[in-house]
Amino acid sequence: MKPVVRSLLETDLYKFTMWQALLHSHPGATGEYEFRCRNEPAYPLAELKADIERELDHLCSMMFTEHEVAYLRGLRFIKGDFADFLTLFRFQRKFIEVTTDGPHLRIRASGPLVHVMGYEIFVLYIVNELYFRRFDQAEAMEVARARLRQKIDELRAFGEEAPRANPFEFFDFGVRRRFSGEWHDEVVQTLARELPVYFKGTSNVYLAYKFNLVPIGTMAHEYLQAHQAFGTRLVDFQSAALENWVQEYRGDLGTALTDVVGMDAFLADFDLYFAKLFDGLRHDSGDPVVWGEKALAHYARLRINARTKRLVFSDALTIPKALNLYRHFADRVMTGFGIGTKLTNDTPFPAINIVMKLVRCNGQPVAKLSDEPGKSQCTDVTYIAYLRQVFNHPV
């Protein structure tokens, strides 16, 4: 069987942007990531252990090619010293282990943060692709292609509606839970060819490089979570993370993630300074309409014209859900929609809801208090209770 990982570029753009920022601000930090499956798979994931071990061996043998590093250097927000670091970088097998607990798969990456933070996306799509290789591939592709055609037809029909103040734009955010690499290629190529007015890029840096698309992404939860362990007062960690981001990127990559300790706590820190500096906000949990209305009300209180900002939605989106959100907000603010699983793994076989999250940094617990209870994650119940108290987060 071909190895699952085709290139070290084949990860989400925000892995590179967070990696660079943390390499510059906290190069000595340590981190620990844990894999978790949030739903019930069709067969025990523990059965994949030997295959995953083989794939990780392959991953740890890979390096960035000269052309790949040159591509990254061409992105204006990637700095020369970080590109130089990547020419030397190789994943270290000693920092990741795979075990089983009955039917459950356990994967843990632990070590220097700048060496282990990159494992997440590779682990997720390795597990996902190995899992789906056991299903009927012909049936999966027949249904997936029909559903992709239905999505395209739906967007073309939407194009007949009266125009709004801002255009509808969506992106592929589907690398981590895709059915396979080959299907991901086909989805992205098809969308780029048939819907160029609406389809504006991909988070998959390898596919952006391969198909001359725009790579999309800014930051993920782990970047803000890590700042819970970086020595500032806990109540100030979001402000510290946002300030470090501003200093690193100087106006580039200006979409801030809002739900590490909930939207209300985020907005308390997102003052006039940050609201003017950042181009917009990204939604990843909770009711998206409630979230968006809170964002618009916050901009209004700060006397900022929301029409100059962008709200990016990325939580379990489908095309119909994205279009409904667009219709609700598009006359008041720019929007964008990152669609993942329902683009790259919409087959007759249910997707597995797998994540690999930062759970400790610099030897202490870190956590995410999502606006959706099922998305919160922490291995230390005492710490998560403390975090809730500090940020007045509902249980």
Image (cartoon, grey):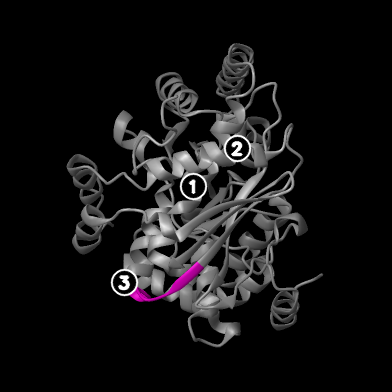
Q: Position of residue 158 (x, y in %)?
A: 60, 24
Which three-letter amino acid code belongs to the residue tagged 2?
A: Leu
Cα gap from disc 2 to disc 3, whole angstroms: 36 Å
Cα gap from disc 1 to disc 2, whole angstroms: 17 Å
Asked whether residue 342 is drawn in magenta, I would say: no
Q: Where is residue 310 in the image (x, y as percent from the top left)?
A: 51, 52
Report which quarter residue 115 is drawn in. bottom left
Measuring 51% from the left and 71% from the top, which residue is drawn there?
226
| Disc on the earlier residue, 1 or 3 | 3
| Residue that mark 1 sits on | 121
| Residue that mark 3 sits on | 24
Measuring 27% from the left and 57% from the top, which residue is drawn there?
78
Q: Which of 335 and 364 is in front in this view?
A: 364
Q: Which of 238 and 103 is in front in this view?
A: 103
Helix, strand or loop at label 2? It is helix
| Disc on the earlier residue, 2 or 3 | 3
Helix, strand or loop at label 1? It is helix
Single out the mark in the foreground, 1 or 2: 2
| Residue that mark 2 sits on | 48
Which three-letter amino acid code belongs to the residue tagged 1?
A: Ile
Cα gap from disc 1 to disc 3, whole angstroms: 22 Å
Q: Can residue 339 be seen in this view?
A: no
Asked whether residue 29 is drawn in magenta, I would say: yes
Label placed on residue 294: none
Question: Can you say whether 174 is above or below 362 in the image?
Answer: above
Single out the mark in the foreground, 2 or 3: 2
Q: Which of 115 and 377 is in front in this view?
A: 115
Q: Residue furthest right?
A: 395
Question: Can you say whether 156 is above or below 12 in the image?
Answer: above
Looking at the rendering, in which quadrant would you find the N terminus? top left
Measuring 73% from the left and 43% from the top, which residue is drawn there?
103
- The residue segment tinted magenta is 25-31
